[in-house]
Amino acid sequence: MLTFWISDAPCTLPANASHQVGIGAMVIDDNKILVVQEATGPTKGSGNWKIPTGVVHQGEDVNEAAEREVKEETGVDAEFVEVLGVRQAHTAPFGKSDIFFLCLLRPKSKDVVKQDTEIEAVQWMPVEEYRSQEFNARSELMKRFADIITALSKGQYTGFRAERLRMGSQPPGAFFYHNTNDISKLSAESLPED
């Protein structure tokens, strides 16, 4: 992008895009989790089973990206439920930062069809088997992912749901991810009126 800053004040335009946005999709059904082995990427050839992951495309919402990545990598149709957590790191390609949304999805189909270019294998794995992989024990982040799965299975964890909200006078178009369970417990009288 070529720019010319007219003001005498210091230029406040960002040099370029500063973040990459990614998703990880936990698709859980009947105490099993949908997992893949990568044919390319950082875990290629390691024997590790991981959740489907990918990058959010420009103009795509996080919830849509999670559904798309699951379909692309595994052939499974899945419905976004909620964001379970967000991780920020500063190790993305080209010296950029990375924001990663861990999402929970509910399967609408169960038959798997692996993507040939990126994925080596796909399966539904028992949650405890996924959790007990050495790969998860070596990484604090992966261990936390596994802890979230356990808490979810016991009904002890709630993430952020997507709610489409209007911004000002514009038509509804922005997704706001928040704990809708707790906000819905508030009575209408306790919330300020528009």
Image (tube, rainbow, N blue to C red):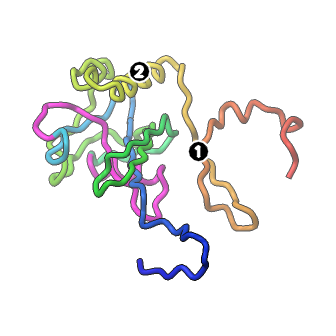
Q: How many marks?
A: 2
Quadrant location of the N terminus in the rendered image: bottom left
Q: Nearer the viewer, residue 105 or 135?
A: 135
As drawn, is 114 to the left or to the right of 190? left
Q: Which residue is mark 2?
A: 147
Asked whether residue 136 is in view, the answer is: yes
Mark on residue 148? none
Dot 2, how many residues are within 10 Å of its Cα: few (below 14), some (14-19), or many (20+)? Answer: few
Badge 1 element? strand
Q: Nearer the viewer, residue 62 or 129?
A: 62
Q: Which residues are magenta?
A: 44-73
| Tag 1: amino acid | Tyr
Mark on residue 177? 1
Figure quadrant of residue 78: top left
Relative image position of residue 45 (x, y in whole percent): 10, 37
Tell me the distance, in whole angstroms, between the alpha carbons under discs 2 and 1: 21 Å
Dot 1, how many residues are within 10 Å of its Cα: few (below 14), some (14-19), or many (20+)? Answer: some
| Residue closest to the far front | 8
- The residue drawn where x is 44% and y is 43% is 101
Q: Is residue 61 magenta?
A: yes
Q: Is residue 192 magenta?
A: no
- The residue drawn where x is 39% and y is 31% is 28
Asked whether residue 105 is in view, the answer is: no
| Residue closest to the far left | 45
Relative image position of residue 121 (x, y in whole percent): 17, 40
| Tag 2: amino acid | Asp
- The residue drawn where x is 89% and y is 37% is 189
Figure quadrant of residue 20: bottom left
Relative image position of residue 97 (x, y in whole percent): 39, 50
Q: Nearer the viewer, residue 127 or 160?
A: 160
